[in-house]
Amino acid sequence: MAKFNRKLARTRRHTRIRTKLQGTESRPRLSVFRSLQNVYAQVIDDIKGQTLAAASSLDEEIKDKISGKKKAEVSKLVGALIAKRAMEKGITQVAFDRGGYKYHGRVKAIGEAAREQGLKF
């Protein structure tokens, strides 16, 4: 029996989600990716194949605020930043793409922070 591959399992879940979820111009997709140390979020129009807004824990805007914070707290800052950047571009509604991850921890923190800033999904 083959060893369980966590990355492959996440990729399969993400593929399953993406068959049902597509970002349009009126309702782009808010995609989340988390690595071991950082977290990334993008607002994507899949029809045009274009990233409309992006934010990550590596951004200069929040770089000075993250020292000494837990990963979930950093994710809240990223969620607020992506929502702010999306709102500046006139985007108020998005389809949330959790990227094959469970909706808890850092992924949930991004989603809740984006909602608090006014994004609807």
Image: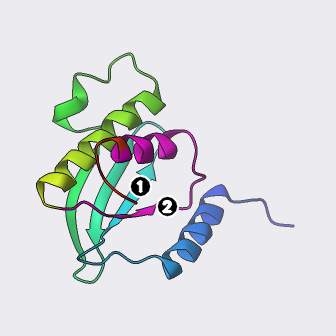
In the image, residue 104 lies in the stretch drawn in magenta: yes
Q: For the image shown, how many numbered marks are present on the structure?
A: 2
Question: In screen coordinates, is 13 left or right of 20?
Answer: right
Residue type, mark 1 in image: Val
Name the image quarter holding residue 14: bottom right
Q: Is residue 83 above or below residue 92?
A: above
Q: Is residue 48 above or below residue 79?
A: below
Closer-to-camera residue (36/46): 46
Residue type, mark 2 in image: Gly
Q: Mark 2 or mark 1, which is nearer the start of the sequence? A: 1
Closer-to-camera residue (65/111): 111
Whether label 1 touches label 2, CB < 8 Å: yes
Considering the image in quadrants, where does the N terminus appear?
bottom right
Residue annotated with mark 1: 32
Alpha carbons under labels 1 and 2: distance apart: 6 Å
Secondary structure beneath label 1: strand
Which segment did they paint magenta? 91-115
Residue drawn where x is 54% and y is 75% of the image: 15
Question: In screen coordinates, is 54 left or right of 115?
Answer: left
Disc sitting over residue 99 in the figure: 2
Secondary structure beneath label 2: loop
Considering the image in quadrants, where does the C terminus appear?
bottom left
Q: Position of residue 84 (x, y in %)?
A: 20, 46
